[in-house]
Image: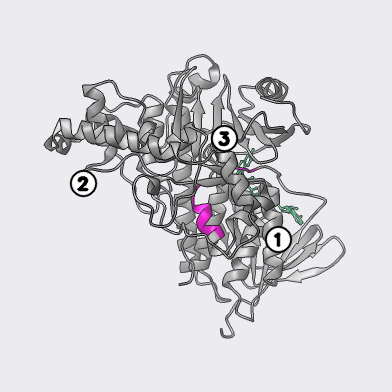
C-alpha cells in the first residue's frame, strides 16, 4: 500500500454483476485501506433473469470459500451437465452439448478424430454417448466426482442452474460481511474531473454525493456510467445475432428437475427450459424483425409443461459489446459491458472473467494505460469468442421452414468463425487459440449436432489399429454407462447435498476445467 493505492471503489448496481464484483473485490482488496461502496436502486430493480451457468462458476464460488450445500439451499440451485438442443439442425432432431470432454484421447490422437474414422466404418451412436456428463444427464443422474477420481468419473464436469436474484442476495450477505457498504438510492447526476475527464462522483436523488477513485458500472443494459456519462460507444452485432427480445415466465415443476438446460428452436427464435429446485425457468428469445411480441408470447405459453406461476416478463436488448469495457476510471461489468444472448449461458461467466481480469490488472490511482488496454483487449477477445460460438448455432442449420432460419442460414458470419467451420469441415480440426472460452468438446458437439460433418479425419489416425480402436471405444462407452447407472438420481443428490447442515468446506473440484477458461487471479 502507498499513496497511490485506490482508496474508494464505488460499484453502481446491485444485480448479479454488482454483487459478484462486490463479493470478489472485498475478498481480494481486503487491505485495510480500500473501501467499497455499492449503490443500487430498488425503484429501478434488476433484470431478474439469468439462471444457467458454465463450469468456471465452481472456481468463483470456491475462491470465495462458498460451501456447495449452503449455496444450493440459498439459491434453489440444481446441477447442470450441459445443454440439450432440440430442433436446431433440423426439426425433430436433438443433440447434447456436454461439459467436460468426449472420450479419452488415444496415443496422442483426439478422441473425436478416432470417432470420425469409426463413423465411416460402422453405424455409431451420437458422440454424446462418449461423454460422462451427457450420459449421466440422459439418465437424470448426478454425483459430484471426488477429487482425484479415476476415469470415467473424472470426466463428469458440471455447473449450476440457480435463481440469479437469490445468488445476488446471497453474495450481498457475503460482501457486507466483508465490509462492503450498501447504499440504496437512484443516481441522478455525476461529475467529471476537469484535468483528465475521470469520473469524480455520483449524486443520488436525496442529494448525497459519493466520490470514488474507481467506479465499476454494473448498472445493466443502460450503461449508466460507461455509456450515458462517458459515451464509450457500442458495437452492434445484430447482423449476426438478430434476436433482440426475450420473454421470461416461470412455471411449476412438472417432475423431478433434469440436470441440464434445454434449448428448443422454434420457427423464429428459441425457448429455454431451466429446472431449479422450486420452479422451472422458461423463456423465449426472438428477433422482432421476424416475430412480434404477442405472437412470441403465444408460442412460449403454448410450449410450457406446466402452468405459469407469474406473469410473462418482456425484455429488450441489442446483442453486442461496449467498445471499451474499461474507459478512464470506469469499468463496465455485466449487461452494461455487453450481451451476447443467453443460448450458451455465458453472461455470468463473462462477469466472472471481468472480475478475474480486474484483479489481475488492478490499477492504482495513476491508472497505467497498459493495464486498461490489456483488460480491454482480453474482454474483447472473450466477447468475440462467445459471439462466434453462438452464431454457429444459427448458421449451421438445414432448416428452411421460416424467413428467420432462411436469413440466419444464408448470412455471412465473422471471418474468425468461417475459418473454424472450414477447418472442421475438411478434417474435423479444432484449434483453441489463447484464452478462448469454448474448447474442442463444445465445437465438436455443436458442429456434428448441426450437420457440419467433416469430409475426412486427420491422417495420423490411420497409424492406429482399427479393431483395437473400435474395442477401446466400446469399452469407454460401457464405462460411462455403468458409472452413470451407479450414480444417485439428480433429485436425490440435491436433497442430500442441500439438506446437510453447513459443514466445513468440502469443496475439492479445483482443477482447471477443460473446455472452459479457468478463473484466474486467485491469490496463492
Ligand atoms: C433473457 C435473458 C436471459 C439470460 N439468461 C442468462 C443465463 O441463463 N445465464 C447467464 O449467465 N446469464 C443470463 N443472462 C444475463 C444475466 O441476466 C445478466 O448477466 C446478469 O443478471 C447481470 O445483470 P447485471 O447485474 O449486469 O444488470 P441488472 O440485473 O440489470 O442490474 C442493474 C443494477 O443497476 C442498478 N441501477 C441502474 N441504474 C441505476 C441508477 N440510476 N441508480 C442506482 N442504481 C441503478 C439497478 O437497480 C440494478 O441493481 C440473461 C439475460 C437475459 C436478458
Which residue is nearer to you in this view: 44 or 410?
44
Q: In the figure, residue 13 lies in which quadrant?
A: bottom right
In 3D space, how far apart are the residues under numbered discs 2 and 1 (Cα atoms)?
Answer: 46 Å
Q: Is residue 488 magenta?
A: no
Q: Does the magenta stretch include residue 56?
A: yes
User: What is the residue that sits farthest to the front in this orientation?
Assistant: 486
- Tag 1: Cα neighbours inside 10 Å, few (<14), some, or many (≥20)? many
The residue shown at (44%, 54%) is 146
- Which quadrant does the N terminus fall into? bottom right
Q: In the figure, residue 29 lies in which quadrant?
A: bottom right
**Mark nearer the N terminus (2 vs 1):** 2
Determine whether, in the image, residue 142 is placed left or right of residue 279. left
**Mark nearer the N terminus (1 vs 3):** 1
The residue under label 2 is 108
Determine whether, in the image, residue 100 is placed left or right of residue 422. right
Residues in magenta?
50-61
Q: Is residue 358 visible?
A: yes
Determine whether, in the image, residue 373 is placed left or right of residue 164. left
The residue under label 1 is 172
Q: Is mark 2 on a helix, strand or loop?
A: loop
Residue 258 is tagged as: 3
Amino acid at each position: 500500500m502507498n499513496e497511490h493505492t485506490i482508496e474508494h471503489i464505488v460499484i453502481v448496481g446491485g444485480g448479479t454483476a454488482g454483487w459478484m464484483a462486490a463479493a470478489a473485490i472485498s475478498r481480494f482488496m481486503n487491505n485495510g485501506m480500500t473501501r467499497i461502496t455499492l449503490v443500487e436502486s430498488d425503484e429501478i430493480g434488476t433484470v431478474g433473469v439469468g439462471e444457467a451457468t458454465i463450469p468456471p462458476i465452481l472456481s468463483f464460488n470456491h475462491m470465495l470459500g462458498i460451501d456447495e450445500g449452503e449455496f444450493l439451499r440459498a439459491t434453489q440451485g440444481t446441477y447442470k451437465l450441459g445443454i440439450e438442443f432440440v430442433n436446431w439442425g433440423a426439426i425433430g432432431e436433438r443433440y447434447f452439448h456436454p461439459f467436460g470432454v468426449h472420450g479419452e484421447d488415444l496415443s496422442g490422437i483426439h478422441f473425436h478424430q478416432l470417432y470420425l474414422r469409426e463413423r465411416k466404418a460402422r453405424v455409431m451412436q451420437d458422440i454424446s454417448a462418449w461423454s460422462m456428463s451427457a450420459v449421466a444427464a440422459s439418465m437424470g443422474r448426478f454425483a459430484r466426482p471426488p477429487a482425484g477420481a479415476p476415469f470415467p468419473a473424472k470426466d463428469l464436469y458440471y455447473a449450476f442452474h440457480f435463481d440469479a436474484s437469490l445468488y445476488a442476495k446471497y453474495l450481498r450477505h457475503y460482501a457486507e460481511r466483508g465490509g462492503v457498504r450498501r447504499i440504496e438510492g437512484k443516481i441522478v447526476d455525476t461529475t467529471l474531473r476537469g484535468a483528465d475527464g475521470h469520473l469524480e462522483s455520483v449524486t443520488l436523488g436525496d442529494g448525497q454525493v459519493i466520490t470514488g477513485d474507481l467506479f465499476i458500472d454494473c448498472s445493466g443494459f443502460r450503461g449508466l456510467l460507461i455509456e450515458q456519462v462517458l459515451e464509450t460507444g457500442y458495437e452492434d452485432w445484430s447482423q449476426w445475432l438478430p434476436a433482440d427480445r426475450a420473454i421470461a415466465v416461470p412455471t411449476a415443476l412438472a417432475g423431478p428437475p433434469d440436470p441440464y438446460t434445454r434449448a428448443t428452436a422454434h420457427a423464429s427464435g428459441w425457448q429455454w427450459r431451466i429446472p431449479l429446485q422450486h420452479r422451472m425457468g422458461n423463456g423465449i428469445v426472438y428477433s422482432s424483425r421476424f416475430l412480434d411480441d404477442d405472437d412470441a408470447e403465444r408460442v412460449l405459453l403454448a410450449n410450457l409443461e406446466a402452468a405459469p406461476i407469474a406473469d410473462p416478463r418482456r425484455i429488450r436488448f441489442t446483442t453486442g459489446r461496449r467498445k471499451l469495457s474499461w474507459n478512464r476510471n470506469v469499468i463496465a461489468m455485466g449487461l452494461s459491458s455487453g450481451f451476447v444472448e443467453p443460448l450458451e449461458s455465458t453472461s455470468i461467466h463473462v462477469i466472472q472473467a471481468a472480475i478475474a481480469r480486474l484483479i489481475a490488472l488492478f490499477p492504482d490511482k495513476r491508472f497505467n494505460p497498459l493495464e486498461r488496454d490489456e483488460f480491454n483487449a482480453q474482454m474483447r477477445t472473450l466477447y468475440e469468442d462467445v459471439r462466434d460460438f453462438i452464431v454457429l448455432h444459427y448458421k449451421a442449420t438445414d432448416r428452411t421452414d421460416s424467413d428467420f432460419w432462411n436469413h440466419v442460414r444464408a448470412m455471412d458470419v465473422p471471418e474468425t468463425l468461417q475459418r473454424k467451420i472450414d477447418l472442421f469441415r475438411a478434417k474435423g480440426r479444432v484449434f483453441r487459440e489463447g484464452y478462448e472460452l469454448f474448447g474442442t468438446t463444445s465445437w465438436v458437439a455443436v458442429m456434428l449436432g448441426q450437420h457440419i460433418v467433416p469430409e475426412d479425419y486427420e491422417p495420423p489416425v490411420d497409424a492406429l489399429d482399427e479393431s483395437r480402436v473400435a474395442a477401446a471405444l466400446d469399452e469407454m462407452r460401457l464405462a460411462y454407462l455403468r458409472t452413470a447407472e451407479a450414480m444417485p438420481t439428480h433429485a436425490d443428490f440435491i436433497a442430500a447435498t442441500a439438506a446437510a447442515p453447513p459443514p466445513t468446506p468440502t469443496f475439492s473440484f479445483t482443477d482447471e476445467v477443460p473446455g472452459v477458461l479457468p478463473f484466474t487471479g486467485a491469490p496463492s
